Image (cartoon, rainbow, N blue to C red):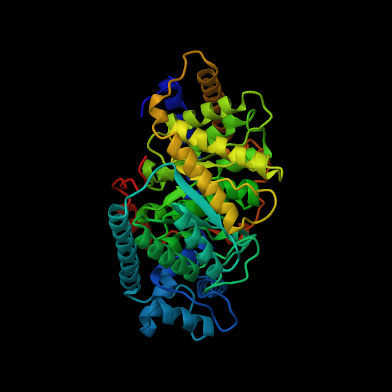
Amino acid sequence: MKEKLKLDRTTIDRARSLASSIVDEVYCVISAYSTDTIERTILRLLGVDGVDEVGIPLPNAVINWAREMNLLKEGIAKPFGTVMVTKGLTPQAAAEAIAKGDVSFAENTEAPGWRKAVDEHAMKALERIRANRAKRAELTGDLAKEESPYLYVIVATGNIYEDVVQAKAAAYQGAQIIAVIRSTAQSLLDYVPYGATTEGFGGTYATQENFRIMREALDQVGAELGRYVRLVNYCSGLCMPEIAAMGALERLDMMLNDALYGIIFRDINMLRTFTDQHFSRRINAAAHIVINTGEDNYLTTSDAFEEAHTVLASQFINEQFAKRAGLSEELMGLGHAFEMDPMLEQGFIHEVAQAQMAREIFPRSPLKYMPPTKFMTGNIFRGHVQDALFMEVSALTGQTIHLLGILTEALHTPHIQDRFLSIEAAKYVRNNMRGIEAEMLFRDGGLMTSRAKEVLSKGVELLEKVKEQGLFTALEEGSFAGIKRPRGGGKGKDGVFEKGADYYNPFDELLAEETSAPAPATLRI
């Protein structure tokens, strides 16, 4: 990519170095811990699914049993593998037996061969993830008639079968990426619902069966259209790694995945979610799933002009978290947004500067560019213009993942025709502005170059401060989005435990080996 803003590379390198130190300090803390969610994820990857006779998901039932028996400190793999071996059961049958109360053995008992049994089933999960990677690579190669920015839209009816109808309609209209919004507050549930669901509020529950249904539908419509249609869901919140595992098993393509978002906007315990995030990103890396981060949300509570540097600083931090988990830059959909007050004089120029800066600092990452929401008023005509300007910035600056704004954003959940109008307008702008990025130059000392350099400088200043005080303290003080969260508080803190000396996670080494080589680009930048 041609660097048009002439940003100082030494300053950018300094920012990355600071972010790396910040993340190193977090890892020094979280490496000693595991969580209930991570242990449930291990069970899911081993093949455990379904619910018990009273509707409790089997992974939860097994972890509850292990906690009651004081068997969790070394990880769920040892006691669960012991049940499998001593009773000669598959993972699913072992979980069902535990849930029924048919299993009891003395504390710390372990059967010879438990590790071998667990490892064999772990390898089966990895083989399924590899097969999904290969299938995606095949489809994106065969169905490669794609233009960028990629047009990304949302469906959110609450009913997975109605979501399929709307998702197919959007794909026929030109959408390239479909996100199924989760039901309101699912991120705060400490379990994953089971089966196909039809009664979500403000969205549709993220379940493995719902993932399978939508994946099948989008593969069908993609084959008809001769292009690959990507599927997105949300592995954030209290079940971050579990949902990442479900997405890997059902071949989702993108996952919103950001512990900082969970801490700031959902008040999730810091230790819990940073620990969960690492394992979830390891899974996403192995599955070649693009993560999307949530920096765009900072601008819904903070001023987009005054606090632009906080978005950049968080992007640097999220980049380092992602690298520690094995994600290549090609899988980092770092978030930013078109959220300046439309009444701000020269606001469009500032938006272009911000977007171009992000594009140049993270040239290999498929950035996720989010639409105006904060200043959508219900005036659908002005809203449509704002969305058109947003698409123009994407075209001017070579953005990759473009989440379409909808003209009725401030009124109701979009109807199919609302989404159609947004897709139609975005295609019009993209077609008319094709190639303009290569034609555009930025004047030395001009407003855009000066603005970008100012934001970068302030971002480094913030990173210096965060490094000095530590990320946990910075979050306590509200350094991002102006929202303060207590380090020792937040939801889910009871689900964190310190690892014992013989703790074992059968996927640690497998995922590390799987992510040691860079992932191929899954989106063309």
On screen, residue 416 versus residue 227, left or right, reads right
Q: Position of residue 312 (x, y in %)?
A: 53, 33
Q: Position of residue 388 (x, y in %)?
A: 56, 38
On screen, residue 317 versus residue 383, left or right, reads left
Residue pictured at 58% horizontal, 69% vertical: 159
Residue pictured at 60% horizontal, 53% vertical: 418
* Most foreground residue, 504 or 35: 35
Asked if 478 appears above or below 153 in the picture, the reply is above
Q: Is residue 505 visible?
A: no
* Most foreground residue, 44 or 206: 206
In the rendered image, the residue lying farthest to the top is: 445
Residue pictured at 49% horizontal, 77% vertical: 50
Q: Position of residue 303 (x, y in %)?
A: 67, 33
Q: Position of residue 58 (x, y in %)?
A: 51, 75
On screen, residue 264 versus residue 324, left or right, reads right
Kindly indicate the quadrant of the structure image that contains residue 202: bottom right
Asked if 108 appears above or below 156 in the picture, the reply is below
Q: Is residue 49 visible?
A: yes
On screen, residue 72 versus residue 183, left or right, reads left
* Most foreground residue, 174 or 31: 174
Kindly indicate the quadrant of the structure image that contains residue 485: top right
